[in-house]
Amino acid sequence: FDGTVVSFTSHGAHVDVGGMLCHVPLRGLADPAPKKARQVLAKGETRPFLLISLDAARRRAELSLPGARP
């Protein structure tokens, strides 16, 4: 999915995918995981992401960058 980075947290980033806010943990950004999501992503940047898990009832999803460990 293409998603736009909207914010950062101490443990990753939040990405908007079609109006749904998704979480990208640090381990989903690179291997090895970066110390901060800002080392890999920029706010407002749109990139392709892979769906790792989905909780449709709670409208929550976990994503990762292609090539990063899930």
Image (tube, rainbow, N blue to C red):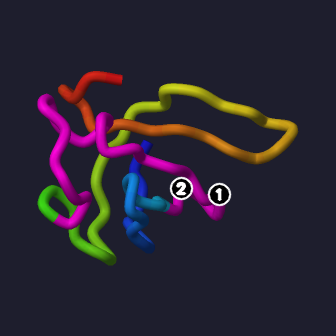
Q: Residue furthest right?
A: 57
Q: Residue 38 location, x and y as percent?
A: 20, 66
Q: Quadrant of residue 28?
A: top left
Q: Residue at x 32, y 76 (%)?
A: 44
Q: Amino acid at mark 2?
A: Val
Residue 11 drawn above or below residue 66: below
Q: Residue 4 location, x and y as percent?
A: 40, 64
CB within 8 Å, label 2 to label 1:
yes
Q: Residue 7 location, x and y as percent?
A: 43, 73
> Is 24 a magenta residue?
yes
> Is 25 a magenta residue?
yes
Please identify the quadrant where the C terminus is shown. top left
Q: Which residue corresponds to mark 1?
A: 20
Please identify the quadrant where the N terminus is shown. top left
Residue 60 circle label: none
Q: Quadrant of residue 49?
A: top left
Q: Residue at x 28, y 54 (%)?
A: 47
